[in-house]
Image: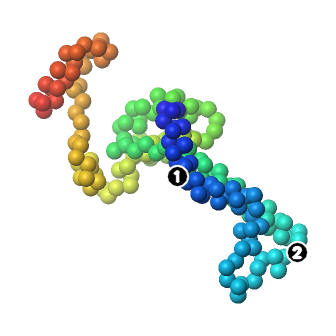
Amino acid sequence: MSEISNKAYELTRQKFADAFHQLDADIQNPYRALLEDDDEDEYKLDAFLDDTELLEEIENQKTVYLKLKEELDAYCRQIVVLGFNSAKYDMNLIKTHLANTLNMHESGQKFTVKRNNSYACLANETFKFLDITSYLAPGCSYAKFLKAYDVTENKGFFPYEWFRQRRQVTSSDTTISRTVLQLIKGM
């Protein structure tokens, strides 16, 4: 998961390279951003402020730009993982394992939104797990959702009938694939 996260961060940073470059320039010289003005009818800021006020305003702008850069970097670091109707079942099922894997028990940035008995969002600084049904119209089925985005795949089927014993779950027997295919074709 860390490798995926690092690669996604690298690609996202490349995508937003212009924004990072502009923020770095504004942090280095916020005076430029305050005084540049294309409209000659407008009065420039330095005409109305004395030196201490101007320096204070520059430091305020620099703080704003630093905060914006931190927020953009945090956005780039976080991968959004979407589930369909996952808040009611999937998230509840894996929440303890997910929390341990993502180190959500340690201090730092973490975010959880719980609604009744479901988790609308689980997040840390690298991953954000969301349920897409929270953002869709009520009654939208998975099939309709896939059709709206021209996805030809269908919902898969898990062959629960085959897994009757624990050893079958960890088995590497080649008959598994044939048995599973037969079960799926029979549905």
Q: Quadrant of residue 55?
A: bottom right
Q: Position of residue 2 (x, y in %)?
A: 52, 32
Of the numbered discs 1 and 2, the one sitting upstream in the chain is 1
In front of the other: 92 or 79: 79
Instruction: Name above or below for residue 93 compared with residue 56.
Output: above
Of the residues shown, which amino acid type is indicated by label 2?
Answer: Asp
Name the residue located 22 percent from the left edge and 18 percent from the top edge.
176
Q: Quadrant of residue 148?
A: bottom left
The residue singled out by tag 2 in the image is 50
Q: Position of residue 95 (x, y in %)?
A: 45, 33
The crowding category of the residue bearing disc 1, from other C-alpha atoms within 10 Å (few below 14, some 14 to 19, many at least 20), is: few
Q: Position of residue 9 (x, y in %)?
A: 54, 43
Left or right of 115 on screen, residue 17: right
> Would residue 173 be visible to someone looking at this image?
yes
In front of the other: 63 or 38: 38
Element under disc 1: helix
In front of the other: 178 or 116: 178
> Would residue 141 be visible to someone looking at this image?
no
Name the residue located 40 percent from the left edge and 44 percent from the top edge.
82
What's the coloring here? rainbow
Element under disc 2: loop
In front of the other: 187 or 179: 179
Q: How many marks?
A: 2
The residue singled out by tag 1 in the image is 15
Left or right of 125 on screen, residue 33: right
Nearest-to-viewer mark from 1 and 2: 1
